[in-house]
Image (tube, rainbow, N blue to C red):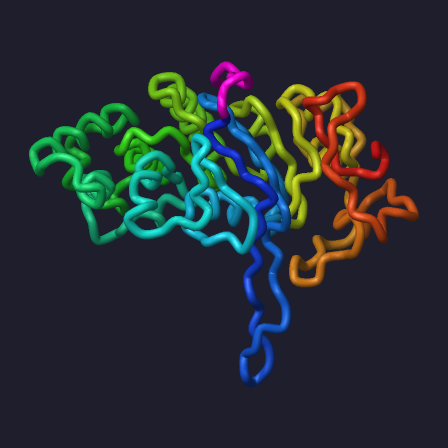
Amino acid sequence: MADNQANGTPILQVRDLKMHFPVKEGILLRTGKFNKAVDGVSLEIQPGETLGLVGESGCGKSTLGRCVTRLYQPTDGRILFEGTDITNINGKELMPFRQDIQMIFQDPMESLNARHTVGDIIQEPLVVQKIGDKASRQKRVKELLDTVGLPARSVTRYPFEFSGGQRQRIGIARSIALNPKLIVCDEPVSALDVSIQSQILNLLIELQKEFSLSYLFIAHDLAVVKHISDRIAIMYLGKIVESSDGETVYREARHPYTQSLISAIPVPDPHHKTERQVLIGDVPSPINPPSGCSFHTRCPKVMGECSSQQPNLIPLADAEEHQVSCHLYS
């Protein structure tokens, strides 16, 4: 993890971002409702920092990552990269930012073209950005393979010839080919064996130190996020409900949802007993989210105003860096 450079200009600023997907209904397939995958998210990432974004499947964290990389056009809000608003730019205007913002995908097999060799896959960003000639690109590919711990002979092989961990190393090599400043890591270890996960996480940490990278690290496993993140933001049904530095989130979690996630983390000591906070019910649909606080239908500490008033994400009185969206602290 890199040192927190909070006094500098954030490399990424997301302001009240929304991504609402239209839902077609009826015989005429008219838009009657919207899937509010991301519904008013604000966050910042400092240069060299890792922000861990955690939440259950379907909470909108991967959608947020795709908005940041501009794979999706947001419905509303702003995305600023190094102070420049990139929310609505497209085509040639977006090309320089494509070079600076890259993404590592969850499933390396699906994100790698099975018909292309590893050499072609890694040098593709260089070709798209028209960087170097054939010889320099081939040299760059071999350098990248060495950086991620793969032999040079891998250039002529195909993705199916590699293990899951090796394929993710190929994806990482592709993501750093253009010397980016920010990488969105979309659950990069969730599809890997536990024994391989730590190797990939350590590789990402080493690359961050070597190339001064910033990460938006998306995951559903708090234990994984703690290992790599400087700060952690907890996401539920399209909104951030709590954020702080990693140690504070683990030791002093305030939001009931965060507390339930932490209680679910397995403890390796069989003699150590933890009190599980099991949530009742299922995650509500983002098409028809609950009124008021979106978590009130499952919250063990629900109060009267929770069903009618949406709490704001505000700093705690005793810790300004620790923000919580809960009526218990408003």
Occupied quadrant, residue 163:
top left
Q: Is residue 8 magenta?
A: yes
Image quarter (top left, top right, bottom left or bottom right) of the C terminus: top right
Looking at the image, residue 232 sits to the left or right of residue 127; the answer is: right
Residue 166 seen in the current view = no
Judge by depth and name the residue closer to the eye, 325 or 61: 325
As displayed, is residue 317 above or below residue 161?
above
Where is residue 325 drawn, in percent x and y?
Answer: 75, 37
Q: Residue furthest top?
A: 3
Residue 318 lies left or right of residue 84; in this view the side is: right
Nearer to me, 101 or 209 = 101
User: What residue is rendered at 13% in x and 34% in y?
Assistant: 132
Residue 53 position in % (x across, y down): 57, 36
**Residue 317: in magenta span:** no
Q: Report the residue at 50% width, 26% height from top.
A: 10
The residue positioned 38% from the left and 37% from the top of the image is: 101
Main SS, magenta residues = loop
Which residue shows up at 35% across the image and 48% down it?
111
The image quarter containing residue 119 is: top left
Image x and y of residue 244, in percent: 66, 25
Q: Which residues are magenta?
A: 1-9
**Most distant residue in the right direction:** 304
- The image shows residue 175 at horizontal and vertical percentages of 32, 36
